[in-house]
Image (tube, rainbow, N blue to C red):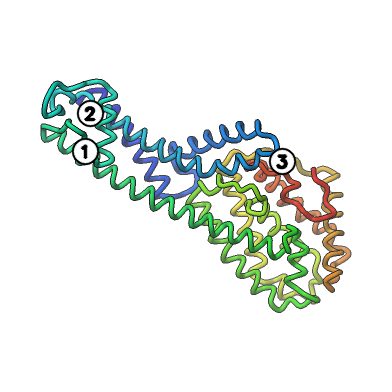
Amino acid sequence: MTLEQIVGAALMLLFLTDIFLTVLYARAGTGLLAPRWNRLVWAAVKAAAGLFGRRRGTVLSFAGPLIVVLLIGFWALGLTMGAALIIQPELGTAIHPSTGSASTDFVTALLLAGNSLSIVGGGDYGPHSSGTRILFLINSLIGASVLSLVLSYLVQVYSALRERNALALTIDLMTNGTGDAAEALARLMPGGDDSDAAAELGNLVRSLTATKEAHHFYPLLFYFRFKEPLYSVSRFGFILLDLVSLIETGLDRKRFRSLLGSAPVASLRRGTMLLLETLDRHFPTGGSRSGRAEDAWRYSQSYAAAARTLADAGIEAEPDGVEQYVAVRSEWEPMIRRVAPTLGYSISDIARRNAERPL
């Protein structure tokens, strides 16, 4: 076995390991090459999108599908290159055409490698020794296996994307399309009746946990960005965390004790934070500004606007809840500020309460 063939085998093993970790092991941040490749493509698309001005969001919406296509091409090229390095030293000896002289250049080796991996045959060329016959058989098995695994992976990714979008749309509809968590709370508790609120929040918890695990299994999901902010993880994450914060700080603790102490409220907070932390941990998120005096002022104005919305729905908010709300929101909003810009959203796309000023 020549040095060239050893390098080729090592290259194929590297790419097969990357495919295994990405598709089968399926945990965020575990791939060898795919995470870095995806980030590189995303950075290139994001840089190119900056040249399109107001159409930047539309350009970024193509990033997810483009990353999928280029990742498959990246894997296919890596496996083909590795197989070609193994095949080339055998050209003209153990691998040659049935008639005429054999071409021994690397392009011919690439063609044979691609053909053997895709199980379409090698034209006139064929293996003429036991070792090369086994090599072609192994290539065929690798090609068939990788193809079926990648197709199955793509089906799962797009299925999870549909479920994420369904959750995002459900949350947006709960706010009557405003993106305001106070509006969602008022609709959950018409006239102050919280009898159905816990059950409705429980339904959200189930969808949220499925979405969180989908992003843990299929990190590609984070790169699927839609032009409409309502479908973004940061947008519906903000609404859920704001909703829980309003429940915990704005409602009367005695009157709504059962809702405040319910499992769905705590689960929504924890599940949303876990989803955002997965993105923050495994993707190049930006820095966040926190602890500024104007942040506290903005949070207090947001609470006042929420109190007015609740009052219009017949729910009296706690007048002394503003300090608690400011403290609670100061804990989770920095995470939103790190995550939102990663996929090209501004805080004004995310925080939509009428009293809030875009920053």
Q: Are marks 1 and 3 in contact (CB under 8 Å)?
A: no
**Nearer the camera: disc 2 or disc 3:** 2
Q: Are marks 2 and 3 in contact (CB under 8 Å)?
A: no
Task: Choose between 103 and 189: the one closer to the eye.
Answer: 103
The residue at which mark 2 appears reads as 87
What secondary structure is marked by label 3?
loop
Task: Choose between 211 and 101: the one closer to the eye.
Answer: 101
**Any mark on residue 121, and which?**
1
**266 lies left or right of 100:** right
Please report whichever mark, 1 or 3, sits nearer to the chain's N-terminal start: 1
Q: Residue, x 81% and y 59% (percent of image)?
A: 324
What secondary structure is marked by label 2?
helix
Query: Vertical placement of 207 versus 228: above or below?
Result: below
Mark 3 neighbour class, 10 Å CA radius: few under 14, some 14 to 19, many 20 or more: few
**Any mark on residue 316, and which?**
none
Q: Residue, x 83% and y 67% (percent of image)?
A: 310
**Nearer the camera: disc 2 or disc 1:** 1
Mark 2 neighbour class, 10 Å CA radius: few under 14, some 14 to 19, many 20 or more: many
On the rendered image, what quadrant is the C terminus found in?
A: top right
Q: The residue under label 3 is which amino acid type?
A: Ser
Image location (x, y in percent) of residue 181: 74, 61
**187 lies left or right of 211:** right
The residue at which mark 3 appears reads as 288
**Nearer the camera: disc 1 or disc 3:** 1
What secondary structure is marked by label 1?
loop
Task: Choose between 304 and 73: the one closer to the eye.
Answer: 73
Image location (x, y in percent) of residue 357: 83, 47
